[in-house]
Image (cartoon, helix red, strand yellow):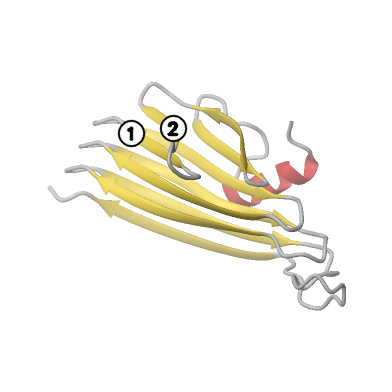
Amino acid sequence: MLNITDKNLLDRISDFSSIPVGASYNIRKNGQGIDRSTSGKVQITNKTDKPGIDITVLPDTKGEKIYIPVIITEEGVSDKVYNDFYIGEGADVEIVAGCGIHNSGCNESRHEGIHRFFIGKNARVVYIEKHYGEGDGNGDGDGDGDGGGAVIGVAVQLVVVVEGAG
């Protein structure tokens, strides 16, 4: 299911190149969910009204790591998702999100994630989001084939710590 390009992108944005055993995760590739696993304390479900997922963490869940990486390996993919995070009271979790794009074509590929967080009383969330793009430098996204401007080896990381009011 995961090829070498997929594994390299996952390693860059999620610090794993194979499926994490026992972890809760949702892997999205080229606009589609391709693999998911949840623990007894974390549930990940598809939205019914728009693209995206709901992540629910039960109250008092401690030490869980949740992965929600997105990888894009085709040109011309435009992916937008709406993810909601429901963190139960007293929970203490880490969420690792991000997007890795490998585009060797001339047409733009992109992913946009709109995230909302609902944090319970005395809960704590560490949210890490990484972005990485690579390509062979032949495209600039406008489809005219003149090259110039492909994103190659760009990486961005965002870390946010949120605590619910006590």
The residue furthest front is: 49
Vertical relation: 125 (above or below) 24: below
**First-in-chain label (2 vs 1):** 2
Q: Which SS class for mark 1?
A: strand
In the displayed structure, does residue 121 sit left or right of residue 142? Answer: left
- x and y, in percent, of residue 4 in the image: 79, 41
**Is residue 98 shown above or below 136?**
above
Which residue carries the number 2 mark?
A: 44
Q: How many marks?
A: 2
In this picture, residue 67 sits left or right of residue 116: right
Q: Position of residue 15 (x, y in %)?
A: 60, 45
Q: Residue at x 40, y 38 (%)?
A: 54
Residue 77 appears left or right of 81? right
The local crowd at label 2, few if under 14, some if 14 to 19, many if 20 or more residues have their Cα within 10 Å, is: many
Under mark 1, the amino acid is Val
Task: Identify the residue at the far top of this view.
Answer: 40
- Mark 2 or 1, closer to the camera: 2
Residues at marks 2 and 1, CA–CA distance in whole angstroms: 9 Å
> On the image, numbered disc 1 is attached to which residue?
57
**Which residue occupies the extreme left position in the image?**
166
The kind of residue tagged 2 is Ile
Residue located at (65% from left, 45% from top): 10
